[in-house]
Amino acid sequence: MMKLRAAAFVAFMASASAFTVDPASRFGKTQLHMVATMEDTAVKAKTPTRFDRLKAAYKGPMPILSDDSVDFSYADFDKAVAETEYSFERDSIVKGTCIEYEPNGGCIVDIGAKASAFLPQNEAALIQKQGDDISDLVDLDTELDFQIISDEDENGQLMVSIRRIQYREAWGKVNALQTEDAVLEAEVVAVNRGGAICLVQGLRAFLPGSHLTGQLPTEDLIGQTLPLKFLEVNQEANKLVVSNRKAVVEQQMADLSRGDLVSGLVKALKPYGAFVEVGGMSGLLHISQISYDRIDDLEKVLQPGMQVKCMIIDHDKMNGRIALSTKTLEPEPGDMLKDPALVFEKAEETAEKYHQRMEAERKAREEAARDIVLGLGDSLDDLGSGDSDDESGESSDPLADVSDSLDSLLK
C-alpha cells in the first residue's frame, strides 16, 4: 500500500512540472518575442504617414492673388515704411492713446511700439489735486503727447510722462510773462515761516513775507488768489520768486495822480519825515510838508501806527514812490501842530478848496501867458506897419538886413 502511494505522488509531480513554463526556457522566450512584435506593429499602425499628413492639410485649390484691385503696390508700401519714423528713445516725444486704467494707479498707453507703454499717476499731470485719481487726469481713447522717460524693461515696456512736457511748457509761459512784465493771478497753496508758496502756471513760486501787502503769511492765506509780479525767474536753478506788493503798487500807481487825497498808516519816523503806507505803497511825508509852521519835535505831531490823510504832491510810477503832504490840508497854517484830528476831519473840504485855488492859479497863469503872446504879436505888427519905400523902391522891412546877412553867410 505504501508503494502505491509513493508511485502516485511521483506521477503527480511529473505532470505538474510538465505544465509549468519557465521564462528562461526556449518556449518562454519565443512567446515574449511574439508579444513585443505585435505591440510594435500596433504602434506603427497608429502613426500617420507623410501622405496622411498632406491629405489632412489639403484645403482645396489655391486662389490666384493679384494686386490689380489695390490702390497701392508693394513698392509704395515699402516706401511708406521707410518714411515712417519709429523713435522710442529716452526723452523722445511720441503720440499715444490711453487704452486702459491700472487698478494700482497708472495707465496703459499705446504708442505704436512692440509693447504698450506705462504712464504712472505721478507723471500724468503737472497739477494734481489731493484725492485725484488717474481717471481724473487723463481720458481714454484720446491721443496725447508723451515723453519717454525710461528704457525698455525685460518685457519690452517703456515708461512715459505727460507731466514733464507740461513742465517745459509752463516755464516757456513764465519766461514770456516775465518778458512782458505782466501782472498775473496765482493761488496760494502753502505757507511757511519765510512767506507763502503760490502756483504759477503749475510751477511752485516763492512769495516772501516782506512782499505781501496788508497780510501776514498765515494759514488764512491758503486758497486766496493774489496779483503777483516776478522778482526772479531762473529755469536752470528751478527758482521762481514773486511779489504781491510790486503788483499792487503798480496797479494803484496807475490810478493815482497829483492832488489825490489818500489815507495811510504811519509806519516809521525819521529825522527828515515820516514813512506812510498807502495801499501797500510806502510814501514819504517830508517834515517840510507836514505843516506851514516849523516843527521842532516830529514825535509830538505823528506817531507810528497813526492813521493820517495826505495829499499826493508827486509820484514816481517806475519805482512805486509817492511824495505826500498834510500842510496842503490845513484849514489854517499850523493846524497840524495844534489839532491834527481837525485837519483830517476837514481833509476832503480843504482838498477841494485847494484844488479850486490851484485851478484858479492855473487859469491866471494861462491868461498871463496869453496876454504876453498877444502883446508880442502887437509889437511885431507895429514893426511891420511902416510900409514906406526907399529911393530904390524896395520895402523898408526891419528884418530885411538880417535876412540879407544870413543869405550872405550861407552862400
Image (spheres, grey):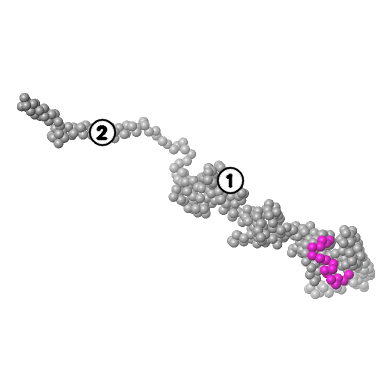
Q: Residues within 10 Å of mark 1 (few under 14, many from 20)?
A: few
Where disc 1 sits, the SS reads loop
Q: Main secondary structure of the magenta part?
A: loop
Say which residue appears at 33% left-offset and 32% top-offset: 56
Say which residue appears at 23% left-offset and 33% top-offset: 39
Which amino acid is tagged 1?
Asp
* Residue 73 position in % (x across, y down): 45, 41
Going from N to C along the chain, the mark reached first, 1 or 2, is: 2
Q: Quadrant of residue 2?
A: top left
Looking at the image, residue 201 lies above or below residue 331 = above
Q: What residue range appears in magenta?
A: 293-309
* Residue 184 position in % (x across, y down): 69, 55
Question: Which residue is more in the foreground, 265 or 181?
Answer: 265
CA separation, marks 1 and 2?
63 Å
* Residue 404 position in % (x across, y down): 84, 73
Nearest to viewer (mark 1 / mark 2): 1
Q: Which disc is residue 133 wearing?
A: 1
Relative to 170, 324 lies left or right: right
Disc 2: which residue: 43
Where disc 2 sits, the SS reads helix
Relative to 229, 40 lies left or right: left
